[in-house]
């Protein structure tokens, strides 16, 4: 495993991180995640296109109540605010990339681990 900076994650690295957060959420809810699906994911062989497909990333934006806005200097910005007013803010060249970075940061922080062979 290697560490990556969430604010720089793109492509399959970002999608893998979103998938990891989703698998952890499902397991915490007691959902039955098939062992072979989980094994493929852990090896970096299975990633859904969360950062490029609204069908995959859109439901996360809605469920997590992420806010998206166009920011002239940084492209898109995504915010996730807590009830206390604190939260997470991430930027990206597209709304989905900004939102998925924000989601991952809210679950893992500024850095996270991905499989060694995974490239952007």
Image: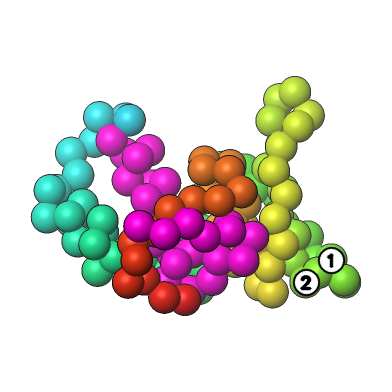
Task: Determine which residue is flagged by label 2.
Answer: 75
Q: Is residue 18 magenta?
A: yes
User: Can residue 62 be seen here?
Assistant: no
> Is 110 on the left-hand or right-hand side of 63?
right
Residues under labels 2 and 1: Cα distance? 5 Å
Location of residue 37 in the rendering, given as x and y in whole percent from the top left corner? 18, 56
Location of residue 5 in the rendering, given as x and y in whole percent from the top left corner? 58, 59
Stretch in magenta:
1-27
Furthest-top residue in view? 84
Furthest-right residue in view? 72
Location of residue 20 in the rendering, given as x and y in whole percent from the top left corner? 37, 50
Give residue 48's quadrant in the image.
bottom left
Q: Is residue 111 magenta?
A: no
Q: State the residue at coordinates (32%, 72%).
A: 117
Location of residue 34 in the rendering, given as x and y in whole percent from the top left corner? 14, 48
User: Can residue 115 be seen here?
Assistant: yes
């Amino acid at each position: 495993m290697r560490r990556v900076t969430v604010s720089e994650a793109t492509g399959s690295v970002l999608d893998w991180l979103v998938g990891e957060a989703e698998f952890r959420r499902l397991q915490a809810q007691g959902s039955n995640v098939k062992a072979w699906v989980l094994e493929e994911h852990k090896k970096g062989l299975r990633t859904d296109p969360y950062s490029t497909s609204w069908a995959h990333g859109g439901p996360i934006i809605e469920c997590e109540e992420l806010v998206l806005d166009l920011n002239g200097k940084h492209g898109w910005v995504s915010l996730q605010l807590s009830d206390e007013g604190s939260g997470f803010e991430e930027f990206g060249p597209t709304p989905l990339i900004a939102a998925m970075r924000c989601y991952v940061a809210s679950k893992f922080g500024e850095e996270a681990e991905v499989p060694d062979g995974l490239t952007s």
